Amino acid sequence: MTDRIYSKKMTEIMAQFIKHTAIHLPDDVMSKLGELYEAEDNPRALQIYDVMLENLRLAEEMERPICQDTGFMQFLIKCGSEFPLLGDLEEVLKEALAEATEETPLRLNVVETFSEENTGTNMGPGAPTVWWEIMPGRDNCEIYVYPAGGGSSMPGASAVLTPSQGYEGAEAFVLERVLEKGPNACPPLLVGVGLGNSSETAALNAKRALLMSVDSVNEDEGAALMEKRLEKALNESGIGPQGLGGKNTVYGVNVVDTARHPACMGVAVATGCWVHRRGHICFDRDLNWKSDTHKDFNY
Amino acid sequence: MTEIRDGRRIIKEPVTTEDIKDLKAGDVFYYSGEALTGRDAVHERVVVDGQDIPVDISDKILLHAGPIVKRVDDGWECFAMGPTTSMRMEDFEEEFIRKTGVKIIVGKGAMAEKTEKACREEGCICCVMPAGCAVVGAACTESVLEGYWTDLGMPEAAWHVRVKEIGPLIVTIDTSGRNFFKDRN
Ligand code: SF4
């Protein structure tokens, strides 16, 4: 294949994948939603779950986005330095987004800061968001697709704490934020917690945490305990689906941490809503692909 | 006008004070008739810029929603529509209710004191509709009658739509100003 044919093929696959993720929830989120539904006993919460499930069924049947808040796309790319399309990837993703915007259609969701103009294309300075990670010597490429909803982004926050505030302070920060802002972010939520050196490293870790499966468990024992404690406290809050009361409030809590300066602890929280449309697709150098979040995705 | 069918309470346009005055925070109903969407920018035009709302909504509902609409031959088709965070409109809502006379506001999540006050004094209710359920919302939307203020962009424009039995709508602030999000427990 020439480079041009190559990049055209990848653009096509990515356009279809973006469309697919707007219409179908990832497999792990689907099964978690089913579990929460089964566990619920509050009649109002059950009525809300019924509408959610009916909506998912209709979205699939009518091939329409589950939620209208689509269009502001965030990509996390983990790309091997030897992947043949490394240099074309941003272009590929932009074209794929343009195609998906037209075909799905996605809502026109990108507004320029200060001028407040809607660009009408879902693209603008720094939009879509693209985060890069290069994997030296590898020839494959993984792409995470995440349409950032407005409501689900609202609870996001980060801060830098002193070591004396420590892990307890970090947990309190996350709890306070989610209890205050979570009810409006369409629970049940996936809560991403990031710990790191500074506010922005913590924030990016929190986003990475959102891109992991809803029931992933941190390998570190202390981090895993933090996940459990936060999950328990948030579920016990009784916020429930749509904030109107119910047995469970979160799909789960994921912690991602990186090393830090001994004098400070960056902490951040990011939330995904019940329509947690995270997609993950992996390509080899010949563009054979596989998605572990959407096993039914076909192209 | 209110109709009870198969145990379902359906409020139909024109909405009257009679339809909403006995509804209590936590009650559930459905709505059929015309509606107008309005988010941040629509509120700003009405409240800050003093512009007239393009459709008289005193007997219809206001939807805090920004749909996905698609151009079709001679009009628009609603592709996906669900509510957006109502709290963003809290600073404007009191005056918006007084200016437009709207009696039912549908969005998502809580609203606060100023809206409670206007609901109590003007006879208005706020409701939430399960959010993230945009296909259910679109399936309830019979037609898009007109798009006003489309210069604001697709999510922010004022879309005049006709809906059929949209819901369930759960009352979160009733005409006594009681707020379900605060008094639930
Ligand atoms: S928070 Fe999620 S489900 Fe709710 S409106 Fe936003 S994108 Fe949709």
Image (spheres, coloured by chain):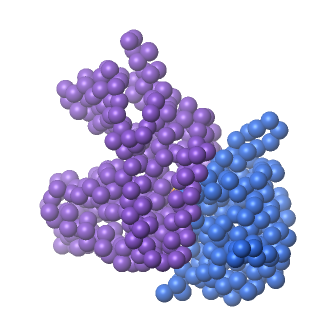
Residue at the image position 15 percent from the left and 59 percent from the top:
A220
Taking the image as shown, residue B102 lies to the left or right of residue A196, namely right
Is B178 placed above or below A117 here? below
Task: Tell which of B66 and A297 is nearer to you.
Answer: A297
Q: Locate residue A295, reporting x and y percent.
A: 38, 41
Residue furthest front in the image? B6
Residue A93 appearing in the image? no
Q: Locate residue A29, reporting x and y percent.
A: 40, 55
Which chain appears purple?
A
Taking the image as shown, residue A111 lies to the left or right of residue A223, namely right
> Image quadrant of residue B47?
bottom right
Is A16 placed above or below B111 here? above
Taking the image as shown, residue B1 lies to the left or right of residue A99, namely right
Please state the total of marks drawn on the protein image. Answer: 0
Is A119 placed above or below A289 here? below
Q: Locate residue A102, reporting x and y percent.
A: 61, 34
Residue at the image position 40 percent from the left and 23 percent from the top:
A88
Taking the image as shown, residue A266 lies to the left or right of residue B49, namely left
> Image quadrant of residue A264?
bottom left
Task: Tell which of A251 and B151 is nearer to you.
Answer: A251
Residue A285 appearing in the image? yes
Residue furthest top in the image? A2
Q: Colour of chain B?
A: blue
Rendered-image quadrant of the N terminus of chain A: top left
Residue at the image position 26 percent from the left and 59 percent from the top:
A255
Task: Tell which of A38 and A45 is nearer to you.
Answer: A38
